[in-house]
Image: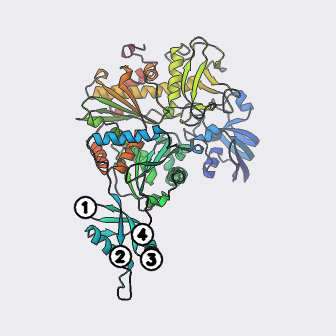
Amino acid sequence: MYKVTFKFENSEDVTVFAAFGESLLEVARKTNVAIDAPCSGNASCGKCRVKLIGGELDSKKTRHISDEEYAAGWRLACVSKIIADVAVLVPDIASAYRSRMKVADLSSPDEIKIFDNIKKSIAEAGIELKNNLEIIRVTMDEPTLDDTMPDNERLVWAIRNQTGMEHVKLPYSVIRKMAHVLRESNFDVNLVIRKTSRDIFVYDICSGEKEPVVAGLAIDIGTTTVSAIIIDMLDGKILAKASSGNGQIRYGADVINRIIESQKPGGRDKLQKAVIEETINPLVKNMCRQAKLNPMSIYRMAIASNTTMNHLLIGVDADPVRMEPYIPTFFKTNSLFAGDIGICVNPDAHIILAPNIGSYVGGDITAGAFVSMLWNKESFSLFIDLGTNGEIVFGNSDFMFSCACSAGPAFEGGDISCGMRATDGAIEACVIDEETMEPTLTVVGDSGTKPVGICGSGIIDIISELFRCGIINPKGKFIRDGERVRRDSDGMGSYILAFEGEEAGSSKDVEITEVDIDSFIRAKGAIFSAIRTMLSYCDFDISMIENVYVAGGIGSGINMANAINIGMFPDIPVEMYHYVGNTSLAGAYAMLYSTASERKVYELASNMTYIELSAIPQYMDEFVGACFLPHTDASLFPSHG
């Protein structure tokens, strides 16, 4: 056995022992060391970079590590084998997806405004903003030698007398502490209950002198990022909000790689633990600390995620999702509780899962389509969710069609050499001077934060600006030279956004390469070709679109003109585009707080027509045509050709 030491820029060392010949990436995974591996260890992405600072590794060279970098000690963890004691540095950008948990400042008007606007839109659509959780106060006669009724029956009788409801359910969590609470409060108690037309379920019991908080938890489980809010279920107020990288990302950036990983021995458990124990539970803990709330006061949850994430969350076999004829275990389920899967809130908290409608169109899209209000408009609207998969909904109050395309993780920083999610240090916007080729960058974080990588919105801006300035051609190849354009020994170009040291906040240059640009051109091509194929399938054309709603947490917002300029979105007036942010989380919030909204989302899902693009021959032709800046057919982009 050999000693393996993982060193970090901003945290303590982790030391473990490994056998001869073990993969360094697998050692890191088993040790819970976060090394980003979007390709799941097949050496195609180049993201699992570590720096050898002591000892030895058997590590072959790859195209992702230059001769200079290799000489400086840089290695890919996935192709490095243990042959002796070794110490490696895990750079901050490699582990940022999990280490940088972001807790929102709810004093910011923008954070509150988002959800206030959601409530307003739902109310204007005639949907009731109410759920069936409430607090009731119950007073009972204390037991005596002449009145020896057991505590549970005494409480049930008191609830029946007060509410008129015959069927009352007391779970174990209430029965367990009932005797103590009743006597401590002289049989005068407050109860948190769920009241339906059929029964009453008692979630919690406390002294009548104590006003309990009735909280709910809404979560958006993205392939790359997990976002969550805690709300007051009685008035819909946001109590806390936070986001973090999805811990599953070290098993692959896309759902296919994660499904493959889940089929290995113990794989399903590893992926479930990565999203629950490493991601959701720490988020809940931090939010509860921020809100000064006991996690046991969270009595209901709503989760919106794609079909694969739903399966991996609850630990069921996801392999049929990726195998023809693409049949998931469920589209919807109403039988899941927090205690079933180990989420650290009240164990009896019912989990509402936003319904899926296809193997690659999940609850994040049904929830998003609901809050974007397509279904409540006569105008023809397009809803686009940009993530590891690109999901699209087209329709109005009469009909809705949906489809999904595999855009890859580029919109969330994956497949990009310096890509990262939209957290501190990410370049989220860029303008390049046409003459000097000098960039002006907008970076996520406090004033003075140095760039360490590029998030999705930044990548769109950078490629658009490189194209506008004539630095790259329509194929994404560098055609101008300058101080910031670097070429390797094979002539492949890259553009340096921030030089190591003075400009960059990372241990290497922040750059975008021709390989990165090619990956992004394929991603944007997948989106545009999916839009064209679906519209054609429905016998519509681009000129009939009246509104486009763009969702996804790829930055503070997308520069729509730049997205059109590179051929990602149709060339229609930019005023028709609306960036609507994380509609998956917004939809989960609506389902959590409003029972009528929950029913409406289920109704929309059952009435939405899912189109399988892979079954339409035209799609591949459209995709090939779209892998160009802006497109091989210049007539589709008269304003930007």
- Marks 4 and 3, the one that precedes in the sequence: 4
Residue at the outermost top position? 435
User: Left or right: where does residue 547 sit relative to residue 294?
Assistant: left
Q: CA distance from mark 1 to mark 3?
A: 31 Å
In the drawing, what numbered circle is on residue 174? 4
Residue found at x 46% / y 25%: 559
- Give me the disc on residue 197: 1
Estimate how packed mark 1 is, as few (under 14), some (14 to 19) or many (20 or more) residues with alpha carbons within 10 Å: few
Kindly identify the amino acid type of the residue bearing the numbered disc 3: Arg
x and y percentages locating residue 571 in the rendered image? 38, 19
The CA distance from mark 3 to mark 2 is 11 Å
Q: Which residue is mark 3?
A: 183
Q: Amino acid at mark 4?
A: Val
Percent across and percent down for residue 570 are 37, 22
Measured in 3D between alpha carbons, the distance from the residue under mark 1 to the one under mark 2, in whole angstroms, is 24 Å
Task: Please give the name of the residue rendered at 37% of the width and 52% of the height, measured from the top-left corner.
Answer: 352
Q: Which residues are magenta?
A: 207-213
- Residue at disc 2, secondary structure: loop
